[in-house]
Amino acid sequence: MNKLYSWYYPIVIIIIAFIGAAFTVYTYVKMTSSIKSSLMERADVVAQVLEYDQIASLTGTKEDLTDPNYLSLKERFTKIRALSGDIRSVYLVGYRDDVPFFLVNSEEYSPPGQIYYEAGAGFRKPFLHNDQTKVVEGVYADRWGTWLSALIPIVNSENDRIVAVMGIDMSARTYYKTIFMYSALPVIATIFIIILIIVGHIIRKKERVLLEFKTEFVPIIVHEIRTPLTGISLTAESLLNYSSDNLLQDQKKDIQMIKESCQNLLTMVGSLLDLSSIEEVASEDILKQQVVVLDLLHEIVKNFELCLQEKNIALIFDPSLTNDVVVLADRERFKRMFDNLISNAIKYSKQHSAVTIGCDLNEQNIVFWIKDQGIGIHPKDQVRIFRGFYRTENAKRIEKHGTGLGLRYVKHISELHGGRIWCESKENEGSTFFVALPRH
């Protein structure tokens, strides 16, 4: 397992980083295309409503300033500019003496006839080659700023010649800001995921250290605690057996309480040791064999005959449990699992009730169930009881002593066999515990 983790996390981080980089590039390309397409669509809409007669009447001189056609186009361009927050200018460009010049501009800084020296190929090519292709040019810079421009040639339908180029400019700052905003999302997500993986690796590493420490520490502590507890218990038993005549009644009670307390602590220590050992076992380490479940249950029930008689409880095997029900399992651990579940069912059942054991078969699983008519479990406790060191309040009223480790042990055994455990219960009506195991 340690070898796995030594290369697993770096490989995952490299893969996540590669995916993040690829998605960032994809987002950049997609957003660039989307912004340019949007700008071109808006420019196309404006160009379609322009009237050729209005444009043809323009001379590109100061005389246009009083021309109604110029004033109409100027007003229209200015409104379009005002309504579009990301559009900086809308204009018409003409061409004479081998240079482009402004016919109409929504901005005041470009009067009619002003030569546009910085105009790129997108402005010149339509006039030089009668190229009617709609293009988005840029990002490029001129004396007024840095722009992304959508350019649409305006064609004279009579002679199929280009008379002007209409342009719409978007500030490069707006363009880059939009792209950066969207492209940053996969970068941030990638960094966040990588941080989570690194933190998870650190936590897992510390967890492994703690588990290794626990593996070494628990048996030592258990041994150190078990030895004096056993000595105290034996001493108390000796006092009760051989010195009872010299002891007062209160003294006998105190010694008996010491003995019982030692026995309870020894039981808890044993449970801790069992749980620690089972948690260190991997599923591939257990030795599985075919187990006839009904035979195994008969063996277990023999140990509970006295308890069943004392509480007048009937233990019933459902007809679904036949000799044909066979599982591939570690026999001793499997037996321990059922022993815990049956013991709990009897312990918390009411007098003159019944405990029923059965199973359900489907294509994937064998689901064993143990149903009692006992005290039941509150819904909020039905998950907690499998965590260990937890006992419900009504369980404590019936039996004061207990570690709450039994069901956690059962859970680990079921998981070692590739299964799971859960319960369904109603308070004061009883509980049903289910163990689902895969069919082999």
Image (spheres, rainbow, N blue to C red):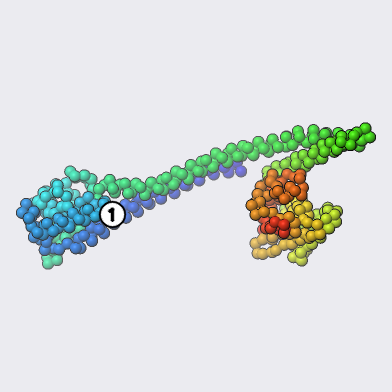
- Residue 25 versus residue 393: which sits nearer the camera? 393
Q: Would you identify the image quadrant in which residue 296 lies?
A: bottom right
Residue pictured at 80% horizontal, 57% vertical: 351
Farthest residue in the left direction? Answer: 63
Viewer-side residue, 410 vs 202: 410
Q: Position of residue 104 (x, y in %)?
A: 13, 54
Task: Identify the residue at image location x=83%, y=58%.
Answer: 312
Does residue 48 show up? Answer: yes
Viewer-side residue, 429 vs 2:
429
Find disc 1 in the rendering and name its residue.
36
Q: Secondary structure at mark 1?
A: helix
x, y percentage for residue 41?
26, 59
Which quarter of the image is occupied by the C terminus? bottom right
- The residue at the point 14 percent across, 55 percent down is 74
Residue 7 in the image, given as x and y percentages of width and height: 54, 42
Quarter placement of the N terminus: top right
Q: How many marks?
A: 1
Residue at 38%, 52% (x, y): give it.
26
Res 335 visible = no
Amino acid residing under circle 1: Lys
Residue extending furthest toward the right: 245
Q: Quadrant of residue 83?
A: bottom left
Percent across and percent down for residue 217 are 69, 35
Specify few, some or many for label 1: CA neighbours under 10 Å numbering under 14, 14-19, or 20 or more: some
